[in-house]
Image: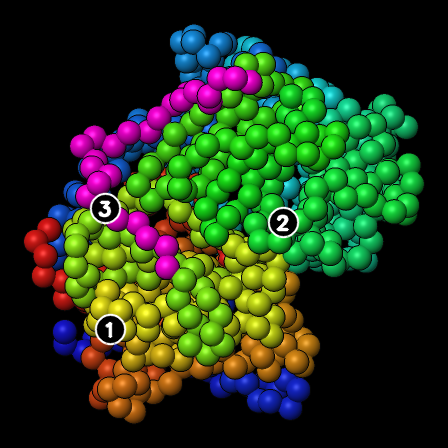
């Protein structure tokens, strides 16, 4: 392709010195989304990327194919509240899923809550539904244009009518019901503009109690920690309803545990007295259930693969007991108490899911659900109910929701809803799991390869996808876009289970974060080398893709090994590793990245920060692959400033080199955010952009 004329961008001589090192930041002006420079930059970039993508007939063909592939009925996992059942459903192309309810498993479904009625373009999304204990009321969160900001509303389940109550400025805190009369919720008071375009840090979160019928300004402040502006909170009510379990986080995994005995405050009139149970940020603890003062927690405290302990809330400092030891290899991913005395445990076993039932009293194994090779993506159950639902997905199974009742132990789980794709032939595909060596340290890294079912292996276009951080594991899931890639391009879809995830517990996460972060990039580069060496693909057919922390992965890899890939796609990426902690919730990521304000971490971050390691290609080996960076104007999880500054730096570097022919594009979507709640229309548009980009730059020949 002819070399692109990249737009002029204002450069300023911004220089700062950290620990004796001078750092220049010439595109600092792009950090303010309201500045003329930033707005012009975005328009100029879209003026290049949109024609590049949309002008070809390819875009229309791919869009048509994706739209028809997408158009199948989808069900979310069901759940029981009170004596009704609720589940989400989508006819196929509805922008937002719709909530239906059933009076019994065999009755007619009734429309309960349809977020599509709340906006004309589907940009208002339902963030969560929290039902009161008896299921008579539900608190639900709405977010607009993909922002993390949530407006909380309340609905009477029986009459299906909303209460007048509206709670604004909430974020990162699911409402917690107190009996049926009100909720505890987290908020960032007097924050100023809060539409998701702002970049200022989310600090000084406070927790209030809202009683149904009251006005938000009369809500009762129940907790604040003014000396700890970075602390964030979440809470749960114990199964007996007497205790408020109060979590405190500052990073993204370790947490503190406090509790308040609500029997002392039948009316919530002021700050709660908290008893401190865990007072150091060293491990993470998750409440499961309690028998009066005996509390069950899942934790990685001295158990990197997680175990279940009991803590006596009457004497929290007494020796904690172990109910279920950590497994030497399998990771206890979550636990749920059901049917009064059972624990349902979800394990990851070499990245696939296992679902076991244990006895709450003794911890002893009871039985295991027989499930296919894949992932338990959804689950619902309650201590007071004998019924559970779980949703199974895999690369080739879009979703099956099972119902099981502990009252009839001898019968198998029954299919409640099955998502089916018209004329989809599972046998046309092949899924394999391969453990490949990291070429630096020899660590064995698993990866899934999904491709057309054929005898011989021949080099075909390959999409290598990774994340590598925050304990996020890439289990088998169903993706229309990835299947379209395999179908339309006769391609290989590869998930690399890089270190930094939780596939093998906390050790796997620890070996991919902080000073070990480079392992993640090496794992990803080793996957590329493995695929090329084993004839799955060739460099010019190989694309890497990642989002958010996975965008950082892509950014670091094209700087470090531009010669290894034919294309790179980074969505809503983190690229400025010296300033990430200054914007929105970025300081929470210090638990994986380290703080730029600490010398050791500063120099570690500087070594791989995409923004600070851009080179001017001095030969074809150093030519960047064709690269597309995507972001969105309402992304307040990872502010678009990261992408704007990175692309400005990349383009200014490559325009000085005669070795750079591959394009470097930026696409900025409007009324869009980090990804959660994105309407189907926008999901399909973005997927079309990505597949069109790959079709063009990988010079794919196959007919569309
Ligand atoms: O920041 C994160 N999570 C990490 C995150 O979103 N990251 C981490 C790096 C960039 C981005 C991503 O990868 O999506 O979550 C904020 C949050 C949500 C709910 C409760 C408390 C705090």
- Which residue is painted at 45% across and 25% down in the image? 402
Residue 684, by quadrant, is top left
Residue 230, by quadrant, is bottom right
Residue 559 rendering spot, x and y as whole percentages: 39, 78
Q: Residue 39 magenta-drawn?
A: no
The magenta segment: 409-434
Q: Secondary structure at mark 3?
A: strand
Residue 549 rendering spot, x and y as whole percentages: 48, 62
In front: mark 3 or mark 2?
2
C-alpha distance separating marks 3 and 1: 23 Å
Residue 515, by quadrant, is bottom right
- Which residue is painted at 62% across and 53% down in the image? 328
- Which residue is painted at 47% across and 38% down in the image? 376
Whichever of callouts 3 and 2 sits on the residue coming sooner in the sequence is 2
- Can residue 56 be seen from the camera position used here? yes
- Which residue is painted at 30% across and 41% down in the image? 396
Out of 212 and 413, give the one closest to the viewer.
Answer: 413
Query: Contact, CB < 8 Å: mark 3 with mark 1?
Result: no
Whichever of callouts 1 and 2 sits on the residue coming sooner in the sequence is 2
Identify the residue position indicated by label 1 in the image. 539
Q: Which mark is on residue 429?
A: 3
């Amino acid at each position: 392709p002819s070399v692109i004329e990249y737009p002029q961008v204002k450069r300023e001589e911004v220089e700062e010195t950290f620990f004796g090192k001078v750092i220049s930041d010439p595109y600092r002006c792009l950090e303010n989304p309201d500045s003329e420079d930033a707005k012009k930059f975005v328009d100029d970039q879209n003026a290049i990327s949109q024609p590049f993508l949309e002008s070809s007939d390819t875009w229309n063909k791919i869009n048509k194919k994706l739209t028809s592939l997408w158009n199948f009925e989808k069900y979310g996992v069901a759940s029981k509240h009170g004596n009704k059942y609720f589940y989400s459903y989508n006819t196929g192309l509805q922008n937002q899923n719709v909530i239906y309810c059933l009076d019994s498993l065999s009755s007619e479904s009734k429309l309960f809550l349809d977020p599509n009625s709340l906006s004309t373009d589907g940009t208002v999304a339902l963030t969560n539904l929290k039902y009161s204990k008896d299921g008579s009321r539900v608190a639900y969160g709405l977010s607009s244009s993909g922002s993390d900001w949530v407006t909380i509303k309340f609905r009477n389940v029986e009459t299906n009518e909303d209460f007048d109550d509206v709670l604004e400025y909430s974020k990162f805190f699911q409402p917690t019901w107190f009996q049926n009369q009100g909720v505890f919720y987290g908020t960032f008071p007097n924050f100023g503009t809060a539409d998701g375009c702002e970049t200022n840090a989310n600090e000084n979160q406070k927790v209030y109690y809202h009683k149904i019928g009251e006005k938000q300004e009369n809500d009762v402040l129940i907790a604040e920690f003014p000396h700890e502006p970075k602390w964030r909170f979440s809470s749960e009510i114990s199964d007996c309803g007497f205790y408020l379990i109060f979590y405190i986080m500052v990073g993204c995994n370790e947490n503190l545990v406090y509790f308040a005995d609500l029997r002392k405050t039948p009316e919530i009139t002021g700050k709660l007295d908290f008893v401190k149970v865990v007072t150091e940020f060293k491990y993470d603890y998750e409440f499961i259930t309690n028998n009066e003062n005996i509390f069950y927690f899942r934790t990685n405290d001295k158990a990197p693969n997680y175990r279940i302990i009991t803590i006596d809330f009457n004497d929290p400092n007494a020796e904690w007991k172990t109910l279920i030891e950590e497994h030497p290899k399998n990771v206890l991913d979550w636990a749920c108490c059901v049917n009064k005395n059972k624990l349902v445990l979800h394990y990851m076993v070499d990245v696939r899911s296992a679902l076991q039932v244990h006895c709450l009293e003794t911890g002893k194994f009871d039985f295991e659900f027989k499930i296919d090779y894949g992932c338990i993506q959804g689950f619902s159950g309650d201590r007071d109910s004998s019924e559970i639902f779980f949703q199974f997905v895999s690369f080739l199974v879009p979703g099956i929701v099972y119902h099981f009742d502990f009252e009839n132990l001898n019968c198998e789980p029954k299919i409640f809803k099955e998502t089916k794709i018209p004329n989809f032939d599972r046998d046309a595909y092949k899924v394999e799991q391969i453990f490949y060596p990291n070429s630096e340290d020899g660590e064995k890294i698993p990866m899934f390869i999904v491709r057309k079912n054929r005898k011989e292996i021949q080099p075909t276009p390959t999409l290598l996808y990774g994340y590598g951080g925050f304990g996020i594991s890439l289990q088998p899931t169903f993706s229309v876009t990835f299947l379209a890639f395999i179908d339309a391009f006769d391609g290989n879809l590869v998930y690399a289970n890089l270190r930094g995830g939780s596939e093998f517990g906390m050790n796997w996460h620890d070996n991919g974060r902080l000073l070990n972060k480079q392992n993640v990039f090496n794992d990803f580069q080793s996957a590329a080398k493995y695929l090329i060496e084993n004839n799955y693909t060739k460099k010019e057919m190989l694309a890497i893709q990642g989002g958010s922390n996975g965008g950082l992965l892509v950014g670091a890899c094209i700087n470090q090994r531009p010669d290894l890939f034919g294309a790179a796609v980074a969505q809503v990426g983190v690229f400025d590793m010296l300033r990430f902690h200054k914007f929105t919730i970025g300081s929470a990521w210090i638990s994986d990245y380290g703080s730029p304000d600490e010398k050791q971490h500063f120099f570690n971050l500087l070594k791989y920060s995409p923004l600070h390691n851009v080179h001017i290609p001095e030969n074809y080996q150093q030519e960047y692959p064709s690269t597309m960076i995507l972001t969105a104007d309402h992304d307040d999880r990872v502010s678009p400033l990261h992408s704007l500054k990175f692309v400005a730096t990349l383009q200014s570097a490559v325009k000085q080199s005669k070795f750079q022919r591959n394009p470097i594009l930026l696409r900025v979507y409007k009324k869009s955010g980090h990804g959660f709640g994105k309407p189907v229309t926008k999901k399909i548009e973005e997927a079309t952009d990505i597949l069109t980009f790959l079709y063009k730059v990988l010079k794919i020949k196959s007919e569309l």
